[in-house]
């Protein structure tokens, strides 16, 4: 909204300016940056102490060292690998299924207004259903096997991806499309050379939030019955009153989820050659 | 001593006495004069009941003995004070394809972890010399396990009444492995803190439970009727469940110690208990035989 | 030789007329300016000439089927490098790449060919846009306020650049602008639109050889004339 | 990104232009708009037919009329009101709790870079945990009563609201803050008169997605044990093998969720007097 | 009487110097232009004068503690109506509202006082920004490229408006611009900055009474002089 670049070498400097002036009130950045681990560390120490001093009951909140021990054990006896990989596989399967379907629907809806007018209300209606409410129905229809798990995750992934593909395509600036028309591009070329690349950033936003939801739904999917997976460990911990197992599996969920997100972000960086934001 | 405004108990289809007590409101009557209310919470299985106890959501919970032991070994602040029944409520069920425990190798078996059927399954496998790695145990709640078996998603199921009786009657399920000794009693547990703070209320609760037990013994047909209505099951299913349940004794004895020790050893072997757990001491701490010594 | 001609050109959006009775003809190698207040229909005429809009009244003759267009915004594709932007829509042959590089050099940013558009300033981006338009070797170049988003000094540099390119290639150009100095510096003839709907108020021929001096006193006189035509100078006694 | 307005009356016209040119490929808008109900209606008819013809088992998928019947019954016997209002109350309680905490944290973090540097890593770490995984821990810590339900919903609501408050505050254009400084505004005035109103649109985006997540989490909260609420109806339907109950409660979830979203959107319209988007 | 004075003003960003050795003094009621290529430090000087930036070398004297500033962008708050934007930061007394209305009328948009900024065109928004600056009745008005985002005709109208306001209020003004015509039309003196770091290359006094004619031949001469100073005209023989 503000200003416009003029000098032939100014653009990059301005960008750096933006980064620096993010914070508004006096900036203690130099002092505090890199000290983000301070508070978590402090909390861990207090927590450990609280456990040893018996301020909290260990059956309610075991010490971090106990949880670390559990994780280490899991690492040694292969539990971590078996269950972690199972859950990751489910998430990925659901993520791919959901994204592919979302892309197909999204592209059709984004390109053809007729299709959009006809099918979008239905999709929006389905979107209003809190996806967890599907669980009992999916169990009824598809049992508790892998199918229903993957489908549940895919449903969770579908909506954010679909929405961002459609809005990405619909919001491609008219100006770029005009350039395509000046070059006499065929409709297919227009899609391939302009519409798709232009909506890529929006698609990635959708993919990332879809992946996040995928991790949420794998928990739901594994809670509904599983013989393997981090969710299974969670339920085992719950049923055998082992809070260390519960917290250890929560930690694993968080870590693996974060790793998959990082992977997606780095793919995104590679694909967007023109910088991370196109505006 | 703190004043108490309400007592919270669970009720469950696997524990008919709790249904009777809830139905007739004897406890409510007894506590009304003291201005104490009664709250009933539905429990789907021992695991849920223990979860509620540990999170201070209920004061009394009815569970299988082994499930309580597992929880106690992990530090749960509970004690078992009363024998609700000696049920043969669990067995291994299949729809016919499996007739022997030895055939379970490599098969999918549904069970609810942390409950008696689960521990029953562990004991059965261990007796047959099958290790846990050789089977695929799917963790589902009891009711979902019954559905999973009838729709063929698992090969076998460590069942629990009344779901088990229902599968037998309605879907042709077969109990291919039974063993009364591997059932670990239906015990009534109380939170330790509650027992210490309100011993007289505990007595009142136990007295009314005793009243319910007597009623069940005297009115088997009515009990079946009640169970069938509450659990939404046919009357013959309810009858089968009750036939397999003995309400003979309500007092904790050394029999329970032995049963629990056997279950505990299996749990130790399967790594479900930490290796440093002292089994006998834990069992002694769990079974509080001083609270209830039979009807006066 | 006439390359472009408009006869009774008019444009309606639904019921409302936005330009009317536009007549002009443009010779080969001419630079013709279209000047007028905002909303007088300058862009409308240019869009019709470029073929982006075929629904108008009257007749347009255009020798070049697919003329090149430079817009106010550079309209570069952010996912392509500068070089790929210039090559957009063309066969990526060795020969083409050489030609694209040549034009990048002509507009003075050959060193930036590997950069992406978001690494360019407004002036650099507009240079790339000009290179992209010229590389297609069309005989007609249409420009819709090509420099109006730039600062005054960059603007002057690019006007000079455009003039140099014209001297080398002699492309016929139609230049829509609202900048009087720009029109006076570049154009052989200026078509003045005025009002809503826009009507051609006058066509002024600037009889000064190119390149011109910006502080030329004769140009100042033409400027006074244009200001009067556009009714902007009345206020001063 | 493109162009700039010039004519003194053009702005509004340009806005209309945007609306019209959204769709790219030939526009059958006039033909298809308003026909969004066509496909849902068709599906309903096929579904009803399929049920009556016994193409699908009714214990797996009852006819829409059966579901409608169940809903009508619930309306008559007050079930709808009792359970619907209970669930809505829970969502609202969790939504308010979560939003208020998120606003407090968000404002502190958005305004004070030191606080941000210190606490943001912790919050980001917690955010990586799929919120459903909290369920067993919350039950362990707070029982199955209303507390743990409301807290679970609040946790779900917290993160999107927090993130959007922080990013809203951090992205207030420097230019506006400079204007405030030219007027010698005190720090508090700066916050009240510029920073907060400027970040309002972003906050509302967060509130809306928070509310959506709130509805998702109420399902999880009620699945973990409840004696009232739509989730209870869902569980009952599951336990008694009544798919009509399951689907009816799903429909109710969707409808009430949609209504609360509408309410939020209309509040947003009232609050943003300057139009729906500021950019 | 001197209202503003700079003595050996210089500004460093970390190690790099962006303007250096700036000396000037501005009398009451003068309109002084600062002109120079992009990056020569025009905005830097103005920010220092406005008090937004206190970290510079040398001395600045400023009679008015808190001068009004108009920026390139209108910087209106989108959540306030036009009237509330003008009243921003002031006591909302009856008297103030009357004064705000008066200035809205002076800039010619009194009918828009209930509108919100996103309903305004660029030209209207900039008028509001000018009203907002004037309503504070400060003796000094600083302008940083106030019209450079507008089209040529709107720009001319607003320059004329600014001149009318100056004739009525006689506010001292410092006008940063890169538009030579604008500087020539409005300013009594023009400070020419050049290079990086920016240095004062010359100070030119325009000896033509205001209001001036835009097509004035004497102004064209001054323009030539400025172009030469800024080394923009060398290219033409
Ligand atoms: N799609 C449209 N629908 C309706 N009216 C339109 C449309 N496009 C343009 N107009 C109107 O047509 C008139 C001329 O528009 P045009 O863009 O040609 O003006 P212009 O002279 O290029 O103005 P500017 O200097 O602002 O670019 C304007 O009044 C505008 O409002
Ligand atoms: N925050 C900053 N940090 C470092 N360098 C800066 C900063 N702000 C400005 N500069 C540099 O200072 C120099 C002068 O900037 P200034 O904005 O004063 O130029 P200007 O003459 O106003 O240019 P323009 O015509 O583009 O507005 C530029 O080279 C710019 O890169
Ligand atoms: Mg135009
Ligand atoms: Mg500047």
Image: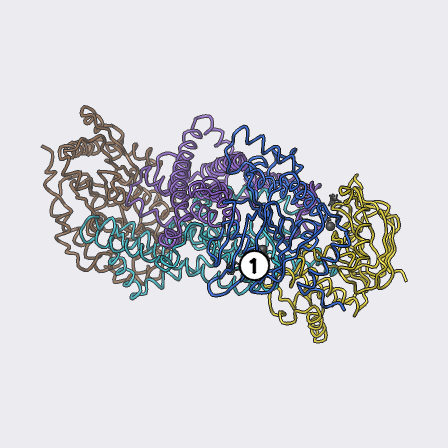
Chain colours: A cyan, B brown, C yellow, D purple, E blue
| Picture residue at 52% right of the left edge, 60% below the top | E8
Give the total of numbered labels: 1
Give the side of residue C172 with respect to residue A142, left or right. right
Give the side of residue E51 with respect to residue B245, left or right. right
Disc 1 is placed on an element classified as loop
Q: Is residue B172 visible?
A: no
Farthest residue in the top direction?
B33
Q: Quadrant of the N terminus of chain C?
A: bottom right
- Front-most of residues A41 and D142: A41
Q: Is residue A44 above or below residue C114?
A: above
Local packing at callout 1 (Cα closer than 10 Å; few below 14, some 14-19, many 20+) is: many
Residue on which the image places disc 1: E41
The quadrant holding residue E192 is bottom right
- Residue C31 place in picture, x, y as percent: 81, 60
- Residue E189 place in picture, x, y as percent: 64, 53
Q: Is residue C215 visible?
A: yes
- Pinpoint the chain carrying mark 1: E
């Amino acid at each position: 909204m503000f200003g416009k670049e003029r000098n032939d070498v100014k653009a990059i400097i301005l960008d750096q300016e933006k980064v620096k002036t993010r914070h508004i009130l006096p900036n203690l950045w130099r002092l505090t940056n890199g000290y983000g681990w301070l508070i978590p560390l402090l909390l861990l120490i207090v927590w450990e102490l609280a456990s040893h001093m018996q301020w909290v009951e260990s059956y309610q909140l075991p010490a971090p060292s106990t949880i670390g021990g559990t994780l280490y054990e899991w690492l040694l006896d292969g539990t971590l690998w078996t269950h972690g990989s199972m859950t990751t596989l489910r998430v990925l399967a659901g993520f791919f299924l959901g994204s592919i379907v979302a892309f197909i629907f999204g592209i059709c809806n984004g390109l053809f207004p007729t299709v959009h007018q006809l099918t979008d209300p239905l999709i929006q209606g389905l979107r209003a259903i809190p996806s967890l409410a599907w669980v009992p129905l999916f169990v009824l229809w598809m049992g508790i096997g892998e199918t229903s798990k993957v489908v549940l995750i895919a449903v969770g992934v579908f909506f954010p991806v679909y929405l961002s593909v459609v809005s990405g395509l619909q919001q491609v600036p008219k100006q770029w499309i005009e350039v395509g028309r000046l070059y006499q591009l065929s409709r297919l070329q227009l899609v391939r050379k302009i519409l798709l690349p232009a909506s890529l950033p929006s698609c990635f936003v959708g993919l990332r939030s879809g992946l996040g939801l995928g991790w949420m739904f794998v928990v739901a999917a594994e809670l509904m019955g599983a013989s393997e997976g981090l969710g299974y460990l969670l339920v085992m911990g719950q049923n055998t009153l082992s809070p260390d197992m519960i917290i250890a599996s929560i930690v694993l969920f968080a870590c693996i989820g974060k790793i998959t997100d990082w992977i997606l972000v780095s793919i995104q960086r590679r694909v967007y050659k023109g910088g991370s934001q196109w505006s | 001593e703190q004043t108490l405004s309400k007592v919270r108990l669970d009720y469950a289809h696997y524990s008919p006495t709790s249904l009777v007590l809830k139905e007739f409101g004897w406890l409510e009557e007894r506590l009304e004069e003291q201005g104490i209310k009664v709250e009933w919470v539905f429990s789907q299985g021992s695991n849920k009941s223990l979860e509620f106890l540990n999170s201070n959501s209920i004061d009394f919970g009815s569970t299988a003995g082994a499930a309580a032991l597992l929880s106690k070994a992990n530090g749960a602040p509970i004690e078992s004070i009363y024998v609700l029944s000696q049920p043969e409520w669990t067995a291994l069920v299949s729809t016919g394809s499996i007739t022997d425990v030895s055939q379970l190798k490599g098969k999918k078996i549904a069970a609810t972890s942390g409950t008696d059927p689960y521990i029953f399954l562990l004991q059965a496998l261990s007796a047959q010399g099958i290790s846990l790695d050789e089977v695929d145990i799917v963790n589902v709640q009891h009711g979902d396990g019954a559905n999973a078996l009838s729709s063929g998603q698992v090969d076998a199921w460590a069942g629990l009444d009344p779901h088990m009786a229902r599968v037998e009657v309605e879907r042709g399920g077969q109990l291919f492995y039974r063993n009364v000794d591997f059932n670990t009693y239906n015990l009534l547990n109380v939170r330790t803190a509650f027992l210490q703070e309100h011993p007289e209320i505990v007595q009142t609760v136990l007295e009314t439970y005793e009243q319910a037990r007597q009623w069940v013994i005297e009115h088997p047909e009515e009990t079946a009727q009640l169970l069938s209505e509450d659990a939404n099951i046919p009357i013959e299913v309810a009858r089968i469940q009750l036939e397999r349940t003995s309400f003979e004794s309500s007092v904790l004895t050394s029999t329970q110690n032995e049963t629990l020790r056997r279950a505990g050893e299996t749990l130790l072997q399967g790594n479900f208990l930490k290796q440093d757990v002292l089994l006998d001491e834990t069992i002694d701490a769990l079974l509080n035989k001083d609270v209830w010594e039979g009807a006066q | 030789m006439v390359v472009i001609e408009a006869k009774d050109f008019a444009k309606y959006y639904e019921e409302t007329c936005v330009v009317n009775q536009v007549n002009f003809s443009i010779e080969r190698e001419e630079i013709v300016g279209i000047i007028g207040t905002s909303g007088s229909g300058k862009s409308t005429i240019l869009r019709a000439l470029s073929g982006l809009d075929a629904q108008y009244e009257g007749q347009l003759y255009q020798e070049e089927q697919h003329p090149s267009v430079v817009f106010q915004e550079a309209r570069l594709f952010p996912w392509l490098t500068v070089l790929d932007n210039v090559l957009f829509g063309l066969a990526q042959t060795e020969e083409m790449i050489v030609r694209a590089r040549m034009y990048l050099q002509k507009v003075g940013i050959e060193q930036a060919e590997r950069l992406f558009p978001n690494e360019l300033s407004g002036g650099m981006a507009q240079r790339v846009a000009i290179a992209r338009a010229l590389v297609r070797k069309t005989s007609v170049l249409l420009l819709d306020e090509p420099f109006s988003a730039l600062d005054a000094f960059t603007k002057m540099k690019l006007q000079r650049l455009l003039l140099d390119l014209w001297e080398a290639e002699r492309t016929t150009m139609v230049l829509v602008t609202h900048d009087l100095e720009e029109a006076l510096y570049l154009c052989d003839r200026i078509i003045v639109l005025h009002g809503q709907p826009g009507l051609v108020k006058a066509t002024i021929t600037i009889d000064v050889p190119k390149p011109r001096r910006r502080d030329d006193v004769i140009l100042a006189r033409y400027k006074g004339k244009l200001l009067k035509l556009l009714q902007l100078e009345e206020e001063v006694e």
